[in-house]
Amino acid sequence: MTRLFAALWPPPEVLQRLAQLDRPAIEGLRWTTEDQWHVTLQFLGETSESQMADAMRTARWGRPLRMTLGPTVALLSSEIVCLPAAAPGLGSLARRVGEVTGILRTNRFNGHLTLARARNKVPRPVLEGLKGTDFQAAWTADTVALVRSRLEPGGARYETVEEFGLSR
């Protein structure tokens, strides 16, 4: 069993822009790194990598999506600093992952790219101060990735298992 999720990876030009965002050192706040920047469609949990890949390989995924990030840095919760991610059909694609894999979402889909995670009770006013930084980027997402996640002391490490094309 492997810890897996389905995601959309931004292209290099968007990653370069994300790398330019200010990341102030704040005790208890862990900034994500370039190799972690993605839009999660669905967390699949500890499951069979081969079964998930087989199911996703045979699925019809629909059309590429015109993705946008922004327009500003936001808080998803008291622990997540993020950029909102949106596209016509993004919620439908996230639901499709559940239909294909048989692992249905237990929470409401909220498209985003995580920039940082707060631990150790970072004060709310400190987190609120991170909101509002302007950032806008767009790209065409033309693949869904099945991603392996390994939890390590320095944070999660991700590896794409396989990508599945969105057809025109």
Image: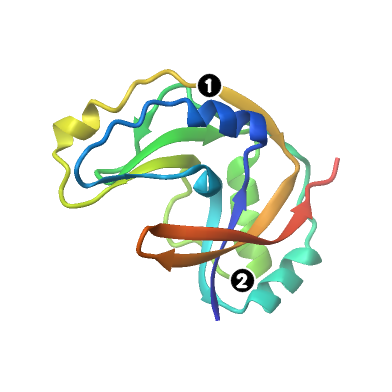
Residue at 17% across / 43% down in the picture? Answer: 122
Residue at 58% across / 24% down in the picture? Answer: 137
Quadrant containing the C terminus is top right
Instruction: Name which quarter of the figure residue 58 lies in.
Output: bottom right
Left or right: 73 as drawn, with respect to 13:
left
Q: Is residue 158 above or below residue 13?
A: below
Label 2: element kind: loop
Quadrant containing the N terminus is bottom right
Instruction: Name which quarter of the figure residue 77 lies in.
Output: top left
| Residue 33 image point, x, y percent | 46, 44
| Residue 87 image point, x, y percent | 61, 33
Residue at 78% across / 42% down in the picture? Answer: 63
Identify residue type, mark 2.
Gly
Identify residue type, mark 1.
Gln
Left or right: 167 as drawn, with respect to 77:
right
Per the image, the residue denoted by label 2 is 102
Q: Marks 1 and 2, how far apart in space?
A: 34 Å
| Residue 28 image point, x, y percent | 21, 47
Q: Residue lying farthest top? A: 134
Q: Residue lying farthest right? A: 168
Between 153 and 141, the one lying in front of the other is 153
Per the image, the residue denoted by label 1 is 136
Residue at 56% across / 77% down in the picture? Answer: 47
Between 52 and 25, the one lying in front of the other is 25
